[in-house]
Image: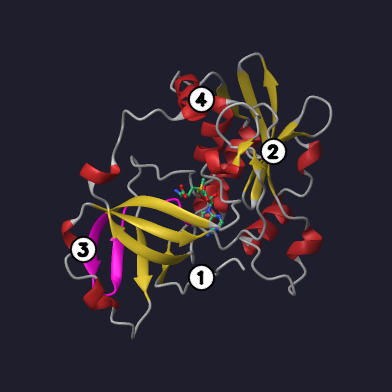
C-alpha cells in the first residue's frame, strides 16, 4: 500500500490578491508588496518561531488549495505554447499540490510573519516554514533546461507595443478610482511579451481579428496589427446569470463586475 501523510496547515496567507491572475508565477521582487502569514493559535507556534527573525528569507511550503486536478503534461505560461512534464515545471497542477516559495521575511510579530512579494493568493494554507540559507539553497550557475532557453528569449525587451483605446483607458481608470481594481499593468506586461493564443495565458480568438485575454475576474478584447496590440475594451469575465445568482459563492469582484456591466453592457459591439 502507498503510505499517506496527513498535513495540517500551520497558518494562512493574508494577501490583497484574491485571484490567481494577480499572483505572478514567481514572486515579483521589485514590487513593494506585503503579505502576512498568520499562524494558527494555540499550537505553540510563537515558540517555534524563535530565531526565525534573523533570516532575510524563508521558504514557504504550501498548498495549491484552489486546484483539484493534476496533469502529467502542462503548458507553462512562459515561452511558446509547448507542453512540458509537470515535474519539469512549477505548475500548480501536480499530483501532490505542494508549492514552494522563498519569500522575503520583513518582520515577525507574535504569530504573524510580515512577508515581501509572494506568489500565493489570499487564504492559501501553509504547511511549513524553513530558513532560506544561501550557502545551501542557491546555485545560480546550475543549468535550468528549457527554462534557460525561454529566459534568454524573454530577457529581450518586450516585442509588442500595447495601446489602450480611449474606451479601455476610461474603463481602467473607472475600475481603479471607483473599485481600486487594477489588472491592466499585468495584462499589458503579458501582451507586450506575446499576444499569441495560449491556454495558460488565457489568450484566445474571439472571431474575426479580435482576441481575448482573461485577467482573473476580468477580460479584455484586443486586436494585433504588426507589432502593436490594441486593447479595444475591457469587460467583466463572468456572465450576468452567474453574477446575479447569489447561490454561487466566491465570485471575485462580483459587485464591481455588476456595476461595470450596468455601465458598459455590450462590450463586443464597442470599439
Ligand atoms: C507557478 S506557481 C509557483 C508556486 C511556487 N513558487 C512553486 O514554485 O512551487 C504560482 C502560481 O500559483 C497560483 N496560485 C497561487 N496561490 C494558489 C493557490 N492557493 N491555489 C492554486 N493556485 C495558486 C498563482 O496563479 C501563481 O501565479
What separation in Å lies between label 4 and label 2 (alpha carbons)?
A: 17 Å
Q: Which residue, as the protein is rendered here, is positioned at the far right?
A: 207
Indicate yes or no whether the magenta region holds residue 75. no
Segment colored magenta: 105-120
Q: Distance of mark 4 from mark 3, alpha carbons?
A: 35 Å
Viewer-nearest residue: 24 or 170: 24
The residues bearing labels 2 and 3 have C-alpha atoms spaced at a distance of: 40 Å
Q: Which residue is mark 2?
A: 199
Q: Are marks 2 and 3 in contact (CB under 8 Å)?
A: no
**In the rendered structure, which disc, 1 or 3, sits on the residue that comes first in sequence?**
1
How far apart, in angstroms, are the residues tagged by discs 1 and 3? Answer: 26 Å
Any atom of ligand 1 within 8 Å of the CB at mark 2?
no
Q: Position of residue 166 (x, y in %)?
A: 62, 32
Q: Are marks 1 and 4 in contact (CB under 8 Å)?
A: no
Nearest-to-viewer mark from 4 and 2: 4
Quadrant location of the C terminus? Answer: top right
> Foreground mark, 2 or 3?
3
- The mark that comes first in sequence, 4 or 3, is 3
Q: Regarding mark 3 in the picture, which secondary structure is present there? A: helix
The picture places residue 254, in percent across and down from the top left corner, at: 65, 62
Q: Residues within 10 Å of mark 4 (few under 14, many from 20)?
A: few
Quarter of the picture holding the N terminus:
bottom right
Mark closest to the chain's N terminus, 4 or 2:
4
Residue ID at (79%, 24%) = 209
Q: Residue at x 16, y 58 (%)?
A: 54
Question: Pointers 2 and 1 in contact (CB under 8 A)?
Answer: no
**Label ID, residue 5:** 1
Label 1: state its secondary structure: loop
In front: label 1 or label 4: 1
The residue indicated by pointer 3 is: 52
Amino acid at each position: 500500500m502507498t503510505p499517506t501523510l496527513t498535513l495540517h496547515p500551520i497558518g494562512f496567507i493574508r494577501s490583497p490578491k484574491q485571484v490567481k491572475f494577480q499572483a505572478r508565477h514567481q514572486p515579483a521582487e521589485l514590487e513593494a508588496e506585503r503579505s502576512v502569514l498568520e499562524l494558527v493559535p494555540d499550537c505553540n507556534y510563537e515558540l517555534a518561531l524563535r530565531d526565525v527573525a534573523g533570516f532575510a528569507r524563508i521558504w514557504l511550503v504550501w498548498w495549491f488549495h484552489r486546484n483539484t486536478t493534476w496533469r502529467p503534461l502542462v503548458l507553462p505560461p512562459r515561452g511558446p505554447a509547448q507542453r512540458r512534464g509537470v515535474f519539469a515545471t512549477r505548475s500548480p497542477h501536480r499530483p501532490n499540490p505542494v508549492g514552494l516559495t522563498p519569500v522575503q521575511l520583513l518582520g515577525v510579530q507574535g504569530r504573524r510573519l510580515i512577508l515581501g512579494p509572494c506568489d500565493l493568493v489570499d487564504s492559501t494554507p501553509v504547511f511549513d516554514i524553513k530558513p532560506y540559507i544561501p550557502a545551501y539553497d542557491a546555485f545560480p550557475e546550475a543549468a535550468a533546461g528549457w527554462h534557460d532557453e525561454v529566459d534568454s528569449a524573454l530577457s529581450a525587451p518586450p516585442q509588442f507595443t500595447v495601446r489602450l483605446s480611449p474606451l479601455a483607458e476610461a474603463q481602467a481608470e473607472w475600475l481603479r478610482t471607483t473599485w481600486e481594481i487594477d489588472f491592466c499593468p499585468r495584462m499589458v506586461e503579458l501582451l507586450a511579451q506575446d499576444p499569441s493564443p495560449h491556454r495558460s495565458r488565457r489568450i484566445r480568438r474571439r472571431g474575426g481579428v479580435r482576441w481575448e485575454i482573461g485577467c482573473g475576474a476580468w477580460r479584455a478584447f484586443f486586436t494585433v496589427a504588426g507589432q502593436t496590440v490594441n486593447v479595444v475594451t475591457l469587460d467583466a469575465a463572468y456572465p450576468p446569470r452567474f453574477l446575479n445568482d447569489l447561490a454561487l459563492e466566491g465570485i471575485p469582484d462580483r459587485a464591481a463586475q455588476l456595476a461595470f456591466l450596468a455601465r458598459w453592457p455590450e462590450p463586443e459591439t464597442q470599439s
